[in-house]
Image (cartoon, rainbow, N blue to C red):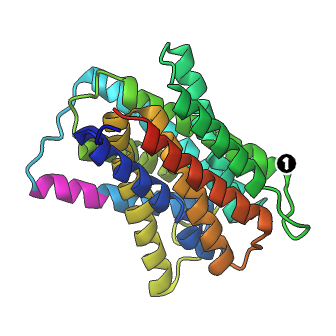
Amino acid sequence: MKPLSRNAIIGYPAGIITGISYGLNPLFGMPLIRDGVSIGSILFFRYAIAVLLLGGFLLLTRQSFRITLRQAGVLLVLGLLYTCSSLFLFEAYNYIASGLATTLVFLYPAMVAIIMVFLRVVPSWPVWVSLVATFVGVIIMTQGDSSQAIHPVGVAFSLASAFVYSLFIVIINRSKAISTLSNTVLTFYALLVGTAIFLGRVFLSSEGRLTTGIEGCTAWCNLLALALLPTIVSTASLAVATRNIGATKASVLGVFEPVTAILVGTLVLGEALTANILVGILLSIAAVTFMIAFTKR
């Protein structure tokens, strides 16, 4: 077996970081929802804080904000897709357990593979085996006990989040227009679009003031954590992973997303942990290990 290439050494860890950091959404989001903060406000502050941090970083490192009109169009689409993915996921939290909702989003690897096939990029057989195994693992994880009510609306929101997230991944991987942009600039503009959308959503809706329910240091720390980990870190590392190992492999490595979400839901949020969940986690991890061992860039 040949050693992993430089792209693989960079891309695989980045994909794992993406999954873990995105899986932390329930850890910081659910306490805010339970305190009565609207989803629009949560996502606005999450994106706005992230944009300020990234903008400050770009200024300190003297990176250019300049983009072409064509790049602006692609970044607008990416921002819309990422915004919809976040919105659908948080809406799903209102109907089903947060761990289950975030787990269902992990069905996006199958969607990515199907989209890539339509683009005439057919994955190798180890990737297909891994896709099938991770899909089965996620399905097993969703088979909870009677304490886990599976509301169809929550499932629909989670699947919608998965679909637009898969489109986000494919565009990053395939668009030549943004191939010259740094990961930080790409992330900055994608989140800037989301900030504008959520600000408009709050003002046009009847959700109340932006800061309703946001009280005390803990709430602001949760918002800061949402901006850093499941937003900046996950989006930037996703861009690194897709550019180095491809969209399909990067999406399969997102198996660490449901694993993290399930652990958070069980250990922190008091959600049920069943034998099915444990079996699903083990199967998914085995599938990822198989993919890394038998594929090379």
Residue drawn 54% across the image and 63% down it: 25
Q: Is residue 189 left or right of residue 106?
A: left
Q: Is residue 117 above or below residue 229?
A: above
Instruction: Tell me the element at label 1.
Output: helix
x and y percent of residue 4 in the render?
Answer: 30, 42
x and y percent of residue 61 in the render?
Answer: 10, 54
Given residues 278 and 217, the one toward you in this image is: 278
Residue 180 covered by magenta stretch: no
Q: Quadrant of the C terminus?
A: top left
Q: Is residue 25 above or below residue 160?
A: below
Residue 58 covered by magenta stretch: yes
Given residues 260 and 201, the one toward you in this image is: 260
Residue drawn 57% across the image and 55% down it: 285
- Magenta residues: mostly which secondary structure? helix
Q: Is residue 33 in view? A: no
Disc 1 residue crowd, few under 14, some 14–19, many 20+, Cα 10 Å: few
Report the residue marked by disc 1: 152
Q: Is residue 146 above or below residue 257?
A: below
Residue drawn 53% across the image and 77% down it: 214
Among all residues in the image, which is located at the extreme right? 146
Amino acid type indicated by mark 1: Pro
Q: Is residue 129 left or right of residue 122?
A: right
Please tell me in which quadrant of the rendered image residue 193 appears. top left
Residue drawn 36% across the image and 62% down it: 49
x and y percent of residue 66 in the render?
Answer: 17, 34
Among all residues in the image, which is located at the extreme bottom? 216
Q: Is residue 57 in view? A: yes
Please tell me in which quadrant of the rendered image residue 276 appears. bottom right
Q: Is residue 189 left or right of residue 129?
A: left
Please tell me in which quadrant of the rendered image residue 57 appears. bottom left
- Which stretch appears magenta? 52-60
